[in-house]
Image (cartoon, rainbow, N blue to C red):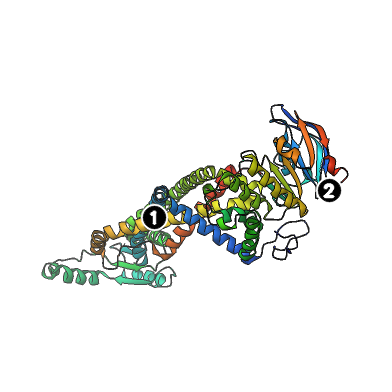
Amino acid sequence: MKASRTRKSAPSRAASGKLRVSPGEWLRQHWLCAKDALQRLFSQPVNTFMTLMVIGVALLLPALLYVLGSNLAQFGNRLTETGQITAYFHDATSDADHLSLVNSLQTDDRINVVNYISTEQAMRDFADWSGLGDVMSNLEENPLPASLDIHLPASGLTDINALAEELSANELIDLVQVDEQWLIRLEQILMLGDRIVLVLVAVLAMAVLFIVGNSIRTIIANRSDEIQVMNLIGATRQYMARPFLWLGLCYGFLGGVIAWILLALMLLFIHEPASALLGFYGSEYQLIGLGWQASLSLLLGSALLGWLGARISVSRHLTKS
Amino acid sequence: MIRFDEVSQRYPGGHEALKQVSFELERGEMAFLTGRSGAGKSTLLKCIMRTESLSQGQILVSGRNIQRISDKQIPFYRRRIGVVFQDHQLLYDRSVYENVALPLRIDGYREADAARRVRAALDKVGLLSKEKMNPIALSGGEQQRVGIARAVVNRPQILLADEPTGNLDPELAADIMKLFEQFNQIGVSMLIASHDLALITRLRHRMLTLDNGRLIRDEQHPSRQGAGSS
């Protein structure tokens, strides 16, 4: 320690004595902190693993429900895309009246296609389809009503219902059938499902906050000597908090990774029977996984939660100067 | 450098640790703070560090009233003061080198600059060859020297020591004091709390004696009369 040695190597200081750290140096310090956090996590593998598993399972539940919801939703989406209404005319109405209604419906924006099925057409279709042509031709009177076959674009369920009501109100129309009534129920179930996922996310996010917060609290308690020394030799609160925030971030992120892996394993496990079941409803249905966007959200969200949990813990338990 | 004006300090619960203490330590001066256990030596040092706050009076360090330093500025104030503790306060989860480097890391030094300074400090206390060891493997005297290296690595203007030789045998204690004198010779102001009268009366420095929180004696060593400020 020669007194003659200059201080030029020291970082620049403002007049107040406050330190200005260059961005590169600041990044390097953070990198060291992150590396140190990971090393600490892996220096106590059993403890760390247990904590991470708890966080992972807590995150797994909402992720699982989300996947379930998105798999159910594909039924809703597919069917509303081909939303269909069948409207039957009264017997005592004329073809001309029918055609004028058809014309007016064809100009309706909500409707993709309107097929008019006259009584004769209905009879022919039925005869072809049933193979009972001979029987039918012996009937004195055509018992089948004329009908409209209306297809809607992927416009959601509100249009279907509104249109169905309008048609019911029309005096030409005897009966309106929305074959997809159950769609409404599905949609409502899905909405309920979304809400449940949201509630679960909120509750389990809180659980993750507490888990990480408590782990960080224990670590702070174990390192109280170090914090005391740091405090006496002039470490700022931010500097002392930094390793714990990084620890929280690592906990959260790795917990998210575990949740993702568990979910992937579960999907792999149920893939075969689930695909078989879905295939029964049509080849276009497939088992949907988390997808990269939701995966990214899961990882970022869990990392953020971990950081937040650590922040809360640090603000409560890090000694004041 | 350090001026106490009628400083009193009362702990919560009513115990008065310091009673109207006044003295001034000149820049570059070295003084011993002595008195029985519980006389208030540690409290006085803690007040300078601002880990204890005053109930009365004021302390000026480099002309600045330290009670007025904001909480945010305290860390930066503490960086200008080196502290040596009786129990070393070393961290046993890292090497000697990392222990000494701690104040520089906090201060944001670049690695290469930090390395130079840490080695210089370790060289000064004679432990350069042990930089990679864990401090727990060192003897008490060596650990104390690591603590001193850490206290001086940032080249503070002021060095405080609280019973730095409390756990050492007389020979090692004398070595540590010699080390302090060397730092004092390059201009560091020093206040060393010690109850080891046998040792400190042999060293020719100012002696402040506390008794039950009161400064009862403030004597310049006879050979140094009038040489307080340099």
Disc 2 or disc 1, which is closer to the eye?
2
Relative height, residue A232 to residue A164 (above, below): above
Does the image show residue A20? yes
Does the image show residue B74? no
Q: Quadrant of residue A28?
A: bottom right
Q: Secondary structure at mark 1?
A: helix
- Kindly identify which residue carries mark 2: B63
Q: Residue at x 44, y 47 (%)?
A: A204
Q: Quadrant of the C terminus of chain A?
A: top right
Q: Position of residue A44 (x, y in %)?
A: 43, 50
Nearer to the camera, A28 or B218: B218
Q: Position of residue A239 (x, y in %)?
A: 62, 53
Q: Quadrant of the N terminus of chain A?
A: bottom right
Q: Residue at x 54, y 54 (%)?
A: B95
Q: Residue at x 69, y 65 (%)?
A: A9
Relative height, residue A282 to residue B220 (above, below): below
- Kindly identify which residue carries mark 1: A259
Q: Is residue B147 left or right of residue A4?
A: left
Q: Quadrant of residue B192?
A: top right
How many other residues sit within 10 Å of disc 2, few (<14), some (14-19) or many (≥20)? few
Relative height, residue A208 to residue B200 (above, below): below
Tell me which amino acid carries mark 2.
Gly
Nearer to the camera, B83 or B197: B197
